[in-house]
Image (cartoon, coloured by chain):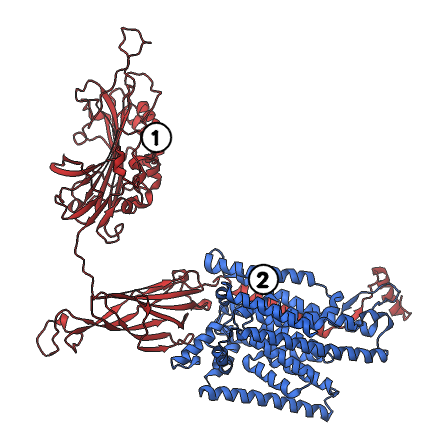
Amino acid sequence: MAAPLTLLLIVAVTIRAVLFRSSLAELIPERVEVVSPLNAWKRVVEGLALLDLGVSPYAGDVFHEVSPLSIPLNESNTSIHPSIMADALTAVALYLAVKDYNKTVFRKQKYALEAERYPLDCLELIRTPKEMYYIPLKVAMFYLLNPFTILSCVAKSTCGLNNAVIALFILCTVKGSSLMSAIFLALATYQSIYPLTLFAPALLYLLQRLYIPVNWQRSSFWLFTTQYTFMYLGSLCVMVCLSFFLLSSWDFLSSVYGFILSVPDLTPNIGLFWYFFAEMFEHFRLFFICVFQINVFFYTIPLSIKLKEHPIFLIFMQIAIISIFKSYPTVGDIALYMAFLPAWNHLYRFLRNIFLVSVVLLACSALFPVLWHLWIYAGSANSNFYYAITLLFNVAQILLVSDYFYAYLRREHHLTHGLYLKRKDGSEATLVLK
Amino acid sequence: MVKEADHVPDTMQTPDVPPPTPAKDQFQEELVIRPLHSGDIYASFQFRTMWDTDFLRGSKVSHYRLFPKSLGQVISKFSVRELHISFTQGYWRTMQWGQPFLPSPPGAELWVWFQDTVTDVDGAWKELTNVLSGIFCASLNFIDSTNTVQPSASFKPLGLGNVTDQRFLRYAVLPREIVCTENLTPWKKLLPCGSKAGLAVLMKSEKLFHSSFHSQALHFRPVCQDWKCKSTVWELRQTLNVVFDLHTSGQGKREWSLFKMFSRTLTEACPLASSSKVYVDVTDNPQGELFELSPTTPLLSQAVVLGDRRTYSVYDLTNQATFGQTRSLNMLLRWRAAESAPPHHDARYVAGYGLQTGEIHTLMYNNHPYRAFPVLLLDTVPWYLRLYIHTLTVTSKGRDNKPSYIHYQPSKDRLRPHLLEMLVQLPPNSVTEVTMQFERALLKWTEYTPDPNHGFYVGSSVISALVPSVVAMDTNSTRECPLFSSFFPCKEESSYFMRVYTEPLLVNLPTPDFSMPYNVICLTCTVVAVGYGSLYNLLTRTFQVEEPSPGLAKRLANIIRRLRGVPLL
């Protein structure tokens, strides 16, 4: 499988290199759908220019990156830009992670089959190695050849770097190395706060891998949990302190984390926050900031309880929820969770809205630049048009995520109760959620 | 000058009736350009159509050649002997501009001499004003008995005829009438060539109405056919007088050309015109020392106008050679004046398009021929225009000019603005351009002014310079000197301190829709609720096989059975 992956990497790098040399390389970094005030390359360059002038980059309101990561980015003058390398790294990490995960899935399935836990009529739901053979390659392909990823890479957005860190975190979790997993998770949280919610699924997966049951009374559970928590918090503290020592001030806390949480910059993007807070009554602003931020973290506990046997799907759900409800989303964040969709190929038969969702996503992606141009350049539309497409885009994403969740739960239900269910009178039954 | 009508014998007629002379209409056009002392320029168009017809004897006129039919029918229907109508915008300033060739009052003025065969002059006057109101798209229908008079001595007939009974004269003026393109278009249509050829191509409304004074008039009267005055012909004169202002149309520069005045040049004479000439008044410029007229023309003519003998350079448009190689005639009058530029001046503007980004350009001019001097540029830019200091470029004479001192304080959203101070050395006789890119922010809806589409102002840049002085300055501050020369302290002899403020900028920001706060809150919360609702459903509910609910009869039966304690259906 190394050969097709290498071929895929070469194709992806070629596409990105070609786009870098074309005239699109000036247009794409300006697009608000692709870059946000948090991860724009222009702002990184600006921060470094401020540093050159002897002013702290956090003295103004332009630079919102955590500095140690951006400085090596600018120093590199190689022909292959770091964002291309980050993309390649992400793809390879996802490939290896999904490959390992497939092995785990197949092993669990084998044990369940031997224990005769599945009803006889749902054998067609069982996954075969043949069908699962190409999934890692498809995952890497979905990530590398996704137009969203390519746009994000050509824009030199640091979102590619964030995605790489999260992908490495997933790889380390799947491989079972809890220290590396904690370090990468701390790095991801250090860059933007939201990956904090990935702590629960990572913990669940590692517990599952070490055969420690999730039981409040068991001491082994608490031992491992405290171990992992300490590793995570320790790495996080080390990183924060390193940042402090780099610029000898705590400015970056309010510039980076305060900025993410309090949303002062209302630059339009594909998310829900900007127009909401542009039109918010002053009196309720704090209340709704809290509501919207809690909304991102709120689903962690219920989802962890429901999906405690399926932590990788939980990671997918969490990344999707972060991408939709975070304060400054970009298309690069969407590309990360969309890369996982081939791993859930077997759920296709239970998806209900996939046609509608894909058409709406395609149409909205096409309409974003059109309505932006009409508002900002032509002056014939106003902000409501762009806002409407934002709403539609997010509704489509929410539908996509909930559809996959529904399909996953339904398949689990069928695996326990049988595929062809009958009513009391023997006729074919329909399943509903009650 | 009138040509003699040719007599063409008509063999169809009987010999004892004199053969009617065939109608020989004639059209002449002329433009006079007169530069005025105040720097403005006065252009006067005159178009004369001679109509050789005899509708007085009752014969119905049915053949129109050069004379406009719409006007001819009106004149013959209402038996008008003389018609004078003018539409004017602006007031003629005699003190600054001298005398006009054809005076007219502001608003609309109409005076008419009817033929003595008209019995009901008032009725004819009412109908005539209404018809003219339709022809000229003007509200002449407001002329009624409340503003009509019959002057006894001031408005004698200007044409032939000895009728002096004021009963046949009517005079009215509408001072409130506005002149616009709607009045110019039908007026132009009365010309034989329309506005397609000849001098009328210059009459484009976007330039004509952007002037200090504009007057279009129409004069109809009977005149002698030639100097022998054996027969009368009807003359229609259409005149257009316009005065272009030095500052509004001339942009402050004392240089006038046909293109600058009318945004058109002349390419041909009207083919129907027997004479087409342009006259430029060069009386004040005998040796060419005041202004320079190009292209040069050998034709010179003198005329007695308004009691004074004036000299004119003449351009004959019927002569193809006037148009030269380029086949277009654009006369240029350029005043010779010694203009000295100050040693240092600045300008600032915003470049770029759209509401997302922009660029601030500051231009600093050093007009001293050989001395360079330093300037300190201070820019205060509000926080909602996010400046990017890495895009700052300073160029002089096409090359990079690195400032020796830069102090930059970036802005903090809603707290403080940007501050940029730079020390730049301006090389002699050069323009230094400072450019910087910025991004426009979207503000909260309460942070916009009540007129958000007016834009937001950016204060002037302050440029403090040490300009080299022409004479040695006095550093002794105790000596007695007038107040106006002693404000800024003088530290050295060879240069003085000067502060220049550039233009403020007006920048538009993208605006949200201000009528939408409640709607936006509802819609966004709906989307969040859609997410919450679907996840809540999937998290709290489980899959169950759906049992169809039994019919109404069965449900009632079940209730009764439950009460009886008997197993249900």
Residue A242 x %, y %: 51, 88
Task: Give the quadrant of residue B342.
Answer: bottom left
A313 vs A219, nearest the viewer: A313
Q: Is residue A220 left or right of residue A87?
A: right
A300 vs B393, nearest the viewer: B393
Q: Is residue B558 left or right of residue A302?
A: right
| Callout 2: SS | helix
A75 vs B151, nearest the viewer: A75
Chain A pictured colour = blue
Q: State the residue lying farthest toward the left.
A: B480
For label 2, the residue is: A365
Judged by depth in the image, the label closer to the viewer, 1 or 2, is 2
Residue in the picture at 16% in, 77% down: B492
Quarter placement of the C terminus of chain A? bottom right
For label 1, the residue is: B131
Q: Is residue B365 left or right of residue A185?
A: left
Q: Three-letter amino acid code at disc 2?
A: Ser
Image vertical order of residue B129 relative to residue B501, above or below: above
| Callout 1: SS | helix
Residue in the picture at 14% in, 38% down: B311
Image marks 1 and 2: residues in contact by CB distance under 8 Å: no
Task: Give the quadrant of residue B456.
Answer: bottom left
Residue in the picture at 26% in, 51% down: B248
Task: Give the quadrant of residue A270.
Answer: bottom right
According to the colouring, which chain is red? Answer: B
